[in-house]
Amino acid sequence: MAFGARIHWSYKGPVRNAAHVIERKTAVQAVEEQLERDYREWRDVGVDPVRMAVLGVEEHELVWIVSWQSEEYVRTRNPEFMLVGNGPYLVDRVDGGLHQVSVVSAVSGEWEADYRARIRGLPVRTVVDDLHGQRPDGWLESQSACRSRIRSRSSGVASKTSAPPS
């Protein structure tokens, strides 16, 4: 691999054939097609729908995060035409799967743990995992023994490990 070559990752590790990784342009096209399908569905049931357009794209290790808004807002940036409550689409970078998340989940970042577990089948790291990953073997036992000695000294009870009272 040449110096500076981009490595693509999937839940199974590095993607050997980078041609199978979904690129930004393909992700945007998938969302635009979905927005058009939604527009036609609403129009076909007699509603006067608003046309939507892609507003922005953010790269994430798992997905492309594609935000969208009314076409009028994207064109003019006039807040009068801005929609609220519409969460972004997530386009899987490995298989191109299209998923929509709520705006709350998008803003809080809660979508990521759910996506890792439910869509990719990956284990989700917790605070406890982070503690185990950062501490050397036996750290917890040594902390427990140290606290036990401190409690013994502060209560005035002598133990084998505490120093004799002065």
Image: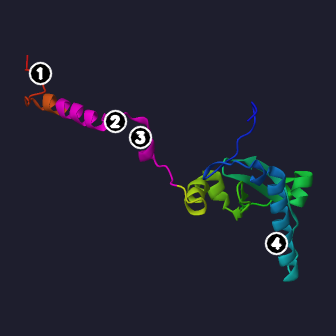
Q: Tell me the tag on residue 137.
A: 2
Q: Tell me the tag on residue 131.
A: 3
Name the residue nearer the viewer: 23 or 151.
23
Closest to the camera, between mark 3 and mark 1, is 3
* Overall secondary structure of the magenta section: helix
Vertical arrangement, residue 13 with respect to residue 71, above or below: above
Label located before the other in sequence (1 or 4): 4
Secondary element at image label 4? helix
Q: Name the residue under label 4.
A: 38
Q: What residue type is labelled 2?
A: Asp
Is 140 magenta? The answer is yes
Distance (Cα) linking label 1 and label 2: 27 Å
- Residue 56 percent across, percent down from the top left: 80, 50
Q: Name the residue under label 1.
A: 163
Q: Which amino acid does label 1 sit on?
A: Ala
Q: How crowded is mark 1: few (under 14 residues within 10 Å), some or many (20 or more)?
A: few
Vertical arrangement, residue 34 with respect to residue 78, above or below: below
Total count of labels: 4
Name the residue nearer the viewer: 42 or 134.
134
Q: What residue type is labelled 3?
A: Leu
Label located before the other in sequence (3 or 1): 3
Secondary element at image label 1? loop
Residue shown at 88% from the left, 66% from the top? 51
Label located before the other in sequence (1 or 2): 2
Residue shown at 14% from the left, 28% from the top? 153
Name the residue nearer the viewer: 9 or 79.
9
Vertical arrangement, residue 72 with respect to residue 3, above or below: below
- Residue 127 percent across, percent down from the top left: 45, 46
Tell me which corner region of the image, top left, top right, bottom left or bottom right, holds residue 114: bottom right
Distance (Cα) linking label 3 and label 1: 31 Å
Residue shown at 44% from the left, 39% from the top? 133
